[in-house]
Image (cartoon, grey):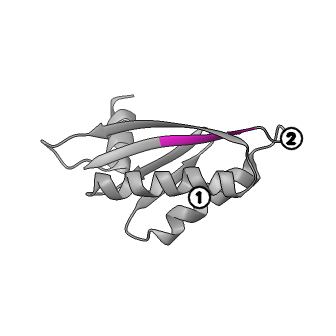
Amino acid sequence: MPIVEFSVVPIGTKSTSVSKYVVEAVKVFKKHGDLKFQVTPMGTVVESDDLAEILKAILEAHEAVFKAGAQRVVTTIKIDDRRDKKETMEYKVKAVKEKM
């Protein structure tokens, strides 16, 4: 199951606060009900059986930040696509905590 972490960073805004832009990006994922996502302090983690759907939503989120008024947007994407096991976000965190 692909698990993807991404972050969008608006550049060219008049403020150091970026939460209003992040909100617009996250709204995109609420429209994609089949994608499970978790907002973290430094990005958003998404999981789905369909990597193409995740990437499509990330592109929409990237564009949403422009629509919110950013003049430049840097989007970073990390993909963990494991095919020998079906691991969820929760499973991965649980596995680490159990070893601590």
Q: Is 21 in front, or is 37?
A: 21
Residue 84 position (above or below residue 38): above
How many residues crowd mark 1 within 10 Å: few (<14), some (14–19), many (20+)?
many
**Which image quarter holds the C terminus?**
top left
Indicate whether 42 appears above or below 2.
above
Along the horizontal axis of the image, is 40 left or right of 77? right
Residue 63 point in image, percent of width and height: 58, 54
The residue beneath circle 2 is 15
Q: Secondary structure at mark 2?
A: loop
Looking at the rendered structure, the secondary structure element under dot 1 is helix
Q: Residue furthest top?
A: 100
Q: What stretch of residues is rendered in magenta?
A: 6-11
State how far apart marks 1 and 2 are (Cα). Answer: 19 Å
Who's the residue at 21% across and 40% down the image?
Answer: 82
Q: Is residue 12 left or right of residue 43?
A: right
Work out whether residue 27 or residue 67 is closer to the camera in this orientation and state it. 67
Residue 40 figure quarter: top right
Q: Is residue 98 above or below residue 90?
A: above
Residue under pointer 1: 26
Q: Nearer the viewer, residue 78 or 68?
A: 68
Residue 16: percent from left, percent from top: 83, 37
Q: Position of residue 87 (x, y in %)?
A: 25, 47
Tally the numbered discs.
2
Does the magenta portion include 10? yes
Majority secondary structure of magenta residues: strand
